[in-house]
Image: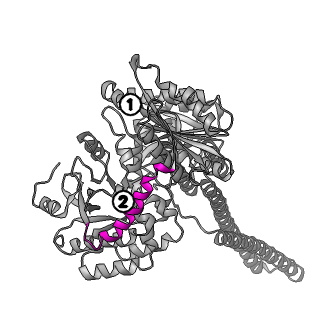
Amino acid sequence: MAHDGFPLPRPRPVSRMISDIVRRLHHLRSEHRRNIALFCALVAGSGLAVLMSLFFDGSMTGLLIVIGGVILLATLLLRRMARQTRDSIRQWQALLNAQQRQADQQEAWRRMRELLQRDLDEDAFLRALLDTTAEVLGVERAGLWFLDEDRALTCRMSLIDSLNGLRLPPNGLDGYLASLTYNPCLVTSDAQHDERLAGLRDYLRDNRIQAMLDVGIFVGGELRGAICCESTHPREWQGDEITSLMGFAGLLSQFSESLRRREVEHDLYRQLHHDEVSDLATLKGLLERLHALIRSHGSFHLLVVRLGGLSHINETLGQQAGDEAIRQVAAKLKERLTELQGEILIGRLPANRLLITIPGQTDDSLRRYCLQRLLTLGDGTWRVFGTPCQLRFNIGVTRYPYDASDIESLLQRAELAVQHARETLPHHLAFYTSQLSDWEHRLSRLERELRTALDAQQLRLYLQGQFDTSGRLAGAEVLLRWQHPREGLLAPGSFIAEAEHSGLIRPMGQWVLEQACALLGGVLRDSDLTLSVNVSVQQLHDDAFITTLTHLLDRHGFAPHRLILEVVESLLVTPGVASRLNALRALGIRLALDDFGTGYSSLRYLQDFQVDEIKIDKIFVDAIKERQDAPLVRSIIALGKALELRVVAEGIESAFQQDYLVTNGVDFLQGYYLARPEPVDAFLRRLDAPSRR
């Protein structure tokens, strides 16, 4: 931070120094008193000698002259000593005052640092900062002024109530702002005649300001405002006072950065937990309440409602019309669901689907309700932006606890039911039954086939290129495909979930790592390309994982930093994972957070865990559209830059998205627009091909 970390003495040395100064002052005063006592004794002795000489011999003129000279010299000496003693006392007193101010400033700094850690709201922190500034510097006028988009200064908060909200136009502020930008602070004891403040003359005159001490507030290296101390009386600002105010400005800059991070966290949390289009919770936003519903041991029905006809609306009227249709459906559903008793949960699922939980109904009563009140929504005509449209509703229903005892299984079986409902005429309503469980048998068969896939050499390595902002091929993400003997080439979505469930993800992940290391140490040895490999939780928890990886690095002999291991955000909160990640970094391997923004929502883990790279998830890249800004993407890139991390954007599917990301500072790009996943030999041919921009 620009002003963070001003060195201040530790409390005990300051106290000891003050005690030493006090003892020294007492010593000087004692010396002064002893000098006066010696002088008085000298004068008294000399006077006694004169009297005795007059009494015994009235002609001792020479002796009187000598004694008079001694007295004169003693007087001059005493005056000189007294003046030196007073000067020394004044100097030590000034030093004592400075040390006391330093101790007070240090205590104020400590209090403000504690407040910074408490995540106070903005107004509370700013007020505490101004009160502390006024206390430490002994001023009555302290305020915080911020620049707006027009470069005008607005008083955000002041100890003088009449100044709050005051706006100073940008005309004439150039000298003042330049001084704050290129110097640590602006210090003046004659404000009304200071040329740097020429544009503030009216303000200074109206408020009778004589002296000013202003320090700039910087956020992200850019001047955003100033913390201002003003005096209506002539005043010379001390060096320690200037340093203290600079320190407070640094704390304010830190607070502004923290506040901005909290706002981004809030936006990310809301996007993941709340659907802006339908104004409904997402599945992630409903999970806690769904689990609470299960813990209550009550029965309920879980419905998945699929909306048909939205694709046609999107294609004919545009995406905004499709969003408006979803918004109208969500509002109508919420209106009709209020007719039922009990706590009704409703949320938005991907792919034009909605989730509803309804407690306290029998199968027959729920069937009647769905037929009479929900499915009839598709009978009429919907008007979207004045255009008549037709929507179709399909509903799949599961029952807790009869059909499944956990949310994931209930959802899976409701999905099966809704697929069946699409073929069920005329009502488009289906309850889950055991006859719909063919998918369970398929998964069982899939697990058996996966166990032979490795030995039968059915796994295939695919690479998707990653490019820098100039279009140069910089590396690739390693992807897995399964050449199934009957079903052909399968993407990971068809088998990874079952691989994780069965534990087969460990040997499969091991095979992928071996292939990647062989490439880096083989045909890619003479290049500087990197390879990124996804690592699962199960792999990291395997005690042999680090040892095996160490052997692979030794065997293939490539620079470890060319291997990037991608972990998902949620992995960071898994107990025991920190030591494994640190061990990987000790090997020289780089770490990346995959699908950044979709896992654990607190960004503090970026600081707690040492990662090298973040990958912006495709759901955020999809939000980049022409004539629309994507503030979350910009914020993620800014956070990555602030933490000195490489930022990779994945899922790029258009030239506009690429240009937008490059303009906003992303480091590397990945997506179908640049390169699709391809076999290794096809990827290697890219090394001889011209770079694509």
Q: In this view, does 335 lie above or below 690?
A: above
Q: What element carries label 1?
A: helix
Q: Can residue 517 be seen in this view?
A: yes
Q: In this view, does 88 lie above or below 285?
A: below
The residue beneath circle 1 is: 310
The residue beneath circle 2 is: 495
- Figure disc tally: 2
| Rendered image quadrant of residue 527 | bottom left
Q: Which amino acid does label 2 sit on?
A: Phe
- Tell me what residue is drawn at x 52 percent, y 53 percent: 409
As drawn, which residue projects farthest toward the right? 55
Q: Is residue 165 visible?
A: no
- Tell me what residue is drawn at x 75 percent, y 71 percent: 26
| Rendered image quadrant of residue 446 | bottom left
As drawn, which residue projects farthest toward the top? 386
Q: Which mark is residue 567?
A: none
Circle 1 crowding by C-alpha within 10 Å: few under 14, some 14–19, many from 20:
many
- What's the magenta region? 434-458
| Residue 198, position as x, y percentages in the image | 45, 33
User: 78 and 297: which one is in front?
Assistant: 297
How far apart are the two marked residues, 2 and 1, measured between alpha carbons?
29 Å
User: 167 and 478: which one is in front?
Assistant: 478
| Residue 419, position as x, y percentages in the image | 42, 41
CB of mark 2 within 8 Å of CB of mark 1?
A: no
Q: In this view, does 551 lie to the left or right of 100?
A: left
Q: Is mark 2 on a helix, strand or loop?
A: loop
Q: Is residue 152 magenta?
A: no
